[in-house]
Image (spheres, grey):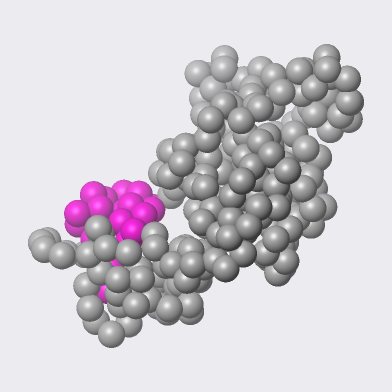
Amino acid sequence: MSCNVPRTKRQKKQESVSPSDHAILLEGGGGDQEKASRTEVTKKLSEMLINEHKNYCPYLLKDSWIELVRFLCLKIHMNDFADATILSPSLEVDGFWHEFILDTKRYREFCHRACNKFIDHDPRGGQNRIKQVQRYYTTIDQYENVFGSPPSQYWPQLELAESTHPHRHHPVMNQEKSEIPIRIVVRDNANTDTLFTVQRSSKVEKILHIMADRVGVNPDDLRLLSSGGGILCPSDSFEDHEIADGDIIYVLRSQSGC
């Protein structure tokens, strides 16, 4: 498969995903041997793409990139190219995905590199909350099968009310307000807007680190301000500052203090 993305010598040496490997992923197969082969190819594909972090998504932290790549590789692993029918990401990983999709050229190149298909994102996937939670736990199951135990800071146990997954006892209804996602706009000094999807309970520092990584500065050199002018302390949550869906947050350079 051809690719126009430049790679270093080290990356070429690590790359081991061949056209025949992609065929194993895309053609599938239900036997134990076929499933084992698909799992190994998915691991190799994720490692290759993780190592190409700077080519595609340098503004995401490396750990964030790892979890996004693993989720997208699971989409390929499960042939989940239709609109939100098999897998769903966590709110954190979904935010990374939204950020990456906005970089349309790089996202398109990534999809071509990964599977020669475009990996669609259906924003309507959360309309049926129960089905979304079922897809989320299918994602967790597949993650464990391929990559091992997922890190809880990116793949949390959902705090809802009744179980809908046949192998897990977790709540599904009556979602806490702090866990309901909101979309916020982060505006930099050049008046460039970036859309993030976060939980109200998420820490401000998550956005601060992403923006600092994007412009190549230390997070301590940036401050986030609410539309009312108040400084958002990194250790606080968005809920602490009563940030609501659709709010604009401003990024400024600063020298000190919360």
Quadrant housing residue 40: top right
Q: Quadrant of residue 227?
A: bottom left
Quadrant placement of the C terminus: bottom left
> How many numbered callouts?
0
Q: Which residue lies furthest to the left in this view?
A: 256
From the viewer's perspective, is residue 25 above or below residue 99? above
Q: What stretch is highlighted in magenta?
A: 203-225
Closer to the camera, 151 or 191? 151
Q: Residue 211 location in percent, x, y? A: 36, 57
Q: Which one is nearer the viewer's eye here, 139 or 103? A: 139
The percent coordinates of residue 174 (x first, y second) are 57, 68
| SS majority, magenta | helix
Q: Where is residue 165 in the image (x, y as percent from the top left)?
A: 70, 47
Name the residue: 23% across, 49% down: 218
- Residue 103: give x, y in percent of width and height: 57, 56
Q: In which quarter of the image is the N terminus?
A: top right
Does residue 193 appear in the picture of this structure?
no
Relative depth, front residue between 14 and 80 = 80
Q: On the picture, is 165 further left or further right than 194?
A: right
Residue drawn at x 78%, y 37% is 78
Q: Which is more toward the observer, 191 or 158?
A: 158
The residue depicted at 88 percent of the width and 20 percent of the height is: 31
Q: Which residue is drawn at 70% across and 61% down?
A: 130
Residue found farthest to the bottom: 228
Res 42 visible: yes
Give yes or no for residue 220 being in the magenta stretch: yes
Residue 177 falls within the magenta-colored stretch: no
Against 81, is 6 above or below? above
- Decide if residue 30 is on the left or right side of residue 89: right
